[in-house]
């Protein structure tokens, strides 16, 4: 018997026909339902456009004061607040203010959508083993699939623009908030839940008044990771028409403009640091507050 070094493959003609049938089926689906699916996201598009205009039309110092106030309320740290003001000032001085505001609007809207969708899914996973076993493989695929792959079906279905980019970013970034919401609720002390049962609390009361408050540090960690993953997707999303810091970075890579890529890449890093410090500081404050409450009780 003669052994072949080549792995046995499907007949090339059969493979081409299979690929063609899949492409035609998806194209047919996009023609029939693409407009309807896009219309479902129109309210989200209007909100994104409004929020982006809000950041761009307000004076720069108003935006900086607002972000500084949020950072101080989250961390109660003048050092962090001063660092945020200086970082945003540097971005403005280097002429990247408008693109930074567009990117910030996209990230905040993506984070809000991820929180609105992800936390309920995490709650369902925490309350049902069957739901957990069904959702976990989907999350594994979403986290391990290369980010470029997300763009293919979204672009074929909805074309290019803000909404396809937003959907791709959310799909890529939503996994951490789902996983850590599920984990946080599962880590709530059973004795605390038994005490709530003893006081006659309903399932909804236990969820809203016991489980979610105690799981908040984990949920904040999930939100933090979701924001970081969304920022990592900014440059890739620029390939399908998402305006912001990603487009100059993509232009710099294409045309080998080192300084342009360096400045705009640094602005993405600054945004990542600002979001990371604010969310982490808020999560630590929540944890200290809860620990202090436990000591008092």
Image (spheres, rainbow, N blue to C red):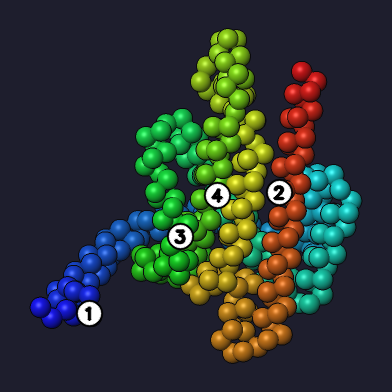
- In the image: residue 192, left or right of residue 63: left
Which residue, given by chain and number where applicable, does mark 2 sit on?
279
Please say whether residue 106 is visible from this viewpoint. no
- Label 2, label 1: how far apart the Cα atoms are: 52 Å
Q: Are marks 4 and 3 in contact (CB under 8 Å)?
A: no
Which residue, given by chain and number where applicable, does mark 3 sit on?
144
Which residue, given by chain and number where applicable, does mark 1 sit on?
6
- In the image: residue 201, left or right of residue 270: left
Residue at left offset 53%, top offset 56%: 173
Which image quarter holds the N terminus? bottom left
Residue 20 screen position, x and y as percent: 20, 73
Which residue, given by chain and number where applicable, does mark 4 sit on?
176
Q: SS of the residue at dot 3?
A: helix
Please report whichever mark, 2 or 1, sits nearer to the chain's N-terminal start: 1
Q: SS of the residue at dot 4?
A: helix
Q: SS of the residue at dot 1?
A: loop
Q: Are marks 4 and 2 in contact (CB under 8 Å)?
A: no
Q: Nearer the viewer, mark 2 or mark 1?
A: 1
- Label 2, label 3: how far apart the Cα atoms are: 25 Å
- In the image: residue 214, left or right of residue 239: right
Q: Return the residue nearer the eye: 228 or 56.
A: 228
Please report whichever mark, 4 or 2, sits nearer to the chain's N-terminal start: 4
């Amino acid at each position: 018997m003669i052994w072949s070094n080549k792995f046995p493959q499907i007949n090339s003609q059969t493979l081409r026909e299979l690929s063609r049938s899949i492409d035609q089926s998806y194209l047919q689906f996009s023609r029939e339902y693409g407009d309807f699916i896009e219309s479902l996201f129109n309210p989200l598009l209007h909100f994104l456009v409004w929020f982006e205009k809000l950041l761009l039309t307000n004076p720069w110092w108003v935006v900086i004061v607002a972000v500084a106030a949020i950072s101080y309320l989250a961390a109660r740290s003048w050092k962090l607040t001063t660092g945020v003001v200086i970082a945003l000032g540097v971005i403005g001085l280097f002429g990247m203010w408008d693109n930074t505001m567009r990117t910030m609007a996209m990230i905040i809207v993506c984070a809000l959508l991820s929180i609105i969708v992800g936390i309920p899914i995490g709650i369902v996973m925490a309350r049902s083993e069957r739901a957990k076993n069904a959702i976990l493989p989907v999350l594994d695929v979403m986290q391990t699939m290369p980010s470029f792959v997300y763009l293919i079906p979204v672009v074929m279905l909805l074309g290019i623009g803000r909404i396809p980019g937003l959907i791709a970013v959310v799909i890529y970034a939503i996994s951490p908030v789902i996983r850590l919401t599920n984990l946080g609720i599962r880590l709530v002390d059973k004795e605390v839940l038994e005490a709530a049962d003893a006081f006659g609390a309903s399932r909804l009361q236990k969820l809203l008044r016991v489980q979610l408050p105690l799981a908040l540090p984990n949920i904040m960690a999930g939100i933090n990771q979701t924001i970081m993953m969304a920022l990592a997707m900014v440059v890739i999303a620029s390939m399908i028409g998402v305006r912001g810091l990603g487009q100059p970075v993509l232009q710099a890579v294409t045309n080998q403009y080192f300084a342009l890529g360096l400045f705009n890449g640094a602005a993405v890093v600054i945004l990542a640091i600002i979001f990371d410090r604010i969310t982490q500081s808020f999560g630590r404050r929540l944890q200290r507050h809860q620990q202090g409450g436990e000591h008092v009780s």
